Structures are given as C-alpha cells and as structure tokens.
Image (cartoon, coloured by chain):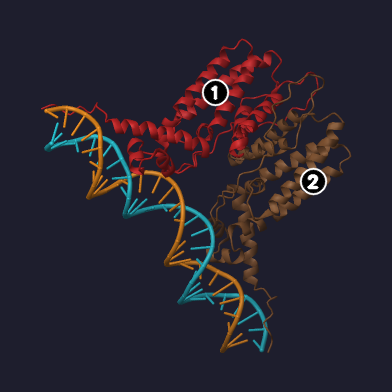
Chain colours: A brown, B red, C cyan, D orange
Amino acid sequence: MTARLPHTVRSDARDNQARILDAARAVFGEEGLSAPMREVARHAGVGPATLYRHFPTKRALIVETFAEQRRACHAAVRDALADSDPWHGFTCLIERICELHANSRGFADAFMTAFPEAMDFTADRERTLRAVAELARRAQKTGQLRPSFVIDDLMLMLMAHRGVQDAPRTARLTASRRFAAYVIEAFRAVPETGAPAPLPPAPHLQLAHSPITS
Amino acid sequence: MTARLPHTVRSDARDNQARILDAARAVFGEEGLSAPMREVARHAGVGPATLYRHFPTKRALIVETFAEQRRACHAAVRDALADSDPWHGFTCLIERICELHANSRGFADAFMTAFPEAMDFTADRERTLRAVAELARRAQKTGQLRPSFVIDDLMLMLMAHRGVQDAPRTARLTASRRFAAYVIEAFRAVPETGAPAPLPPAPHLQLAHSPITS
DNA sequence: ACCGTAACGGACGCACCCGTCCGTTTGGCT
DNA sequence: AGCCAAACGGACGGGTGCGTCCGTTACGGT
C-alpha cells in the first residue's frame, strides 16, 4: 500500500496555477484590483472554481500575484540605502517606486491600499517609508533635499501618483515619469530663496481601508 | 373649468428636491460619486423612487448637485485671467481649484472624469485648461514659470491631486494644501540651474471614461 | 369639508461580482 | 489498459447597486 504522497502535484494543476498567475498579473496590472475574478479566470482559460481552488480568496491571489514586484521594491530600497550619494539614492528610489507602480496598476493599488489582514504590502510600505526617512536625513544634511521635507510627504506623493494611473493605458508610463520628475524637482532644496515653507502636511497620513470587501 | 396649470409645484415636492440636493452634496462630497443613490435618498429622508422622479438618472443628479462648484470654478478662472501678475494668478488658480476639489470629493470625481454625454464638466475642464494655457504663456514670459511647463502638466497634477483625496477625511484638506504648495514649487522656474528638463509628458492626456456606468 | 391629482415610497426586476457545490473529466500510477 | 483520486467547470446562492411599478398618501383648489 503506497500511501498517497500529497507532494505529487498533477501537471495540469501546476500548469493552471501558472497560467492563473500570469493572467492575474496581466488583468490586475491593466485594470487594477477592481477587475473581477471571472475576468482573470477567462483570461487564464479556466473556470472560476479552479481559480478559487488555487487561491481561496481574491486577496490571496493578489498577494501571490505581486510577489515579484514586492521583491523589486525591496531591492530598490536596499540599493537606495547603499548609495553613497544620499540625494541620488533618494531620487532613484522615487523613480523606481513610481515605475513599479506605473507598470502595474494592481500593484499600485495593493501597495497603497491598507487592507487590514494581508500585511504583506503594509510591511513593504513601512519598510520603504523608514528607508526614505533615513535617506532623507542624510540628503538634508548634504543640503540637496529641502529641509521642510517630512516623511509623510512621500506618502502624499505616492497617493498622488496613484491618481496619475487613471490616465489611459498608453499615456500612463510617460505621465508617471513626468510626475516623478516634478516630484523630485519639488523636493529639491532651492538655492537660497526664502521659499515659504509649504503648509504642514497631514500628520500621520493613515490610509483608508481597502475597497476590496471580499 | 380651471385648466390644470402645471406651473404650480407642490410644496412638498419643492422641499424634497432641495433636501435631495443638500443630501447629494453631503454624500457625494464625502464619499465621492461611488456613493449609492440609496444613501443619498436615506440622507434626504425620501424613498428611492422620489429621488429618481426628481432626477431621472444618477448622472443628472450629479450634474445638478455641483452647479455651484462649477460657478466657483468659472470665477476662479476669471479672476486668474484678470490678475495683473500672471504668476500670482496662476498659483492662486491652482490653489483654488485644488481647494474646490478637496472640499468635495464628488466634484473632483466629476471634474476629472470624462463622462461621455454630460459635457458640462468637460466644458469646465476645457475652459480651465485654456485659461491656464494663456496664463502660462504670460507667466513664462515673466520668467517665473518653468519654461518646460506645458498645459498637459496641469491635467497631470489634477489627476494626481485626485489621488490625494483618498486620504482619510480629517487629513484631506491639509494634504491637498500641502500638495498644491509642492506643485507650485515644482512649476516655479529655477533661478539659473541647468535643471534637466523632465521627460516629455503624455501627449494629449485624454481621460478614461467614467466608472459611472448607469 | 371634499375631491382629484400629483407626489410619495416600499417592493420589485435586472445586472454584476464574490465565493461554493457537485457532477464530470482527466492525469498518472499500477 | 484500468482505476481512483485529484482537478476541473458550469451552475448556484448571497449580496449590492441602479432604475421602475403600483398601491397609498396628502397637498391645495373649490
């Protein structure tokens, strides 16, 4: 009696799982997290039940779908902290995060949306914020980063950047890059002008909870 | 036989219409256009049917609801064009538009969302854009506005500003003001630095169509 | 005070989306 | 080749939101 080894995964199952993840990356990346599960299933060429067997809930699918983008985010943070020029690291980090968000609307949604349980993305966000806070301190010391910059300003700009993603597909990447460039210009310290410090930002810019009810 | 004059409007109907508009301003202003019609009805203390008799569709209600904000927008444009200092007019216009959008999430949605038929808001937006284009030419001549500024940059920033509105209710206004201040800093011409011109923006930043299907 | 008609609102139909059930198919081991 | 369990997917239930129908209410003119 050969005990059934649960380690053997049927090939079609494995295949479908891969196709589902590809489809999810495509669909969520293009339409954001509001895209229906059915469309992911259709795009993957499977039934809804199959999708739900592999990923018990929409949130679970989302978390798995963007694992790679999460790693890319970590790498960006690591590189930025390792950069010998704080301001250069700071601006590169902003550009890389914006590009990550622009390349996948779904990842931008997941990253910026506080959904209560799946703290994977929340952890990434916190990590990024802490890294930027550290970078900011250094870049302010070199005089290249505006002294009035506070960490909440990054949240502010990332939320704003999410609004840019509502641009039509063809314009998104260009718009995102232009926006990132303007953000960097806004954060750069002005030479000598007594530029009036902008109003204080929202203290502790906490996000609203996820629209993903399910 | 006194022919029924359809000009006489029953007092309760008139009352309800006013209450519905108030409710719509409150609900849509707070939750955006995604708020259900039922909630507007509940907030107004009427049944759904009553609401739909006064405004045959959600879009019709929206258009009527934000008539005042539209007027305020026109006034801001007019004042900006009349300002003798183009840069001052330009920055004030940005601040006023942002404040209008921050004070009513629904108006921001309606203003920025291209919904195909109700071109009321589209017209406002075009008008605003043309005004800014004119202001921009003047402000660039005075050297205060960055020469690389193009009109699509305003659309870009207004789209971004809409993302800021996803902040929690208490932080929205502060965040909006901070954002507007940063935008102005970003648009301001730098004294002498050969600041690398940001990448070209999305040509003809046309909006995606409205999520208000109904 | 009475009555006709306009206005009201609860209940309904329709469409969409999330997640589940169960009868059917199929991979892979013997 | 045959078998069995694992995987599949069409169909279903539950929930929500838009817009409509029709029996009931109440305004306001006589």
Q: Quadrant of the C terminus of chain A?
A: bottom right
Image: C23 above or below A192: below
Visible residue check, residue B45: yes
Q: What amino acid type is highlighted by mark number 2?
A: Val
Visible residue check, residue A47: no
> Label 2: chain?
A
Q: What amino acid type is highlighted by mark number 1?
A: Thr
User: What crowding class fits label 2: few (fewer than 14 Cα within 10 Å), some (14-19), or many (20 or more)?
Assistant: many
Badge 2 element: helix
> Residue drawn 39% across and 33% down?
B19
Q: Quadrant of the N terminus of chain A?
A: bottom right
> Residue drawn 48% across and 42% down?
B35
Residue ID for mark 1: B128
> Residue drawn 76% across and 30% down?
A187
In front of the other: A136 or A46: A136
Report x, y in % for residue B56.
35, 38
Report x, y in % for residue B203.
62, 31
Q: Looking at the picture, do discs 2 and 1 lie on one chain?
A: no
In front of the other: B143 or A52: A52
Residue ID for mark 2: A77
In front of the other: B128 or B88: B88
Report x, y in % for residue A159.
65, 39
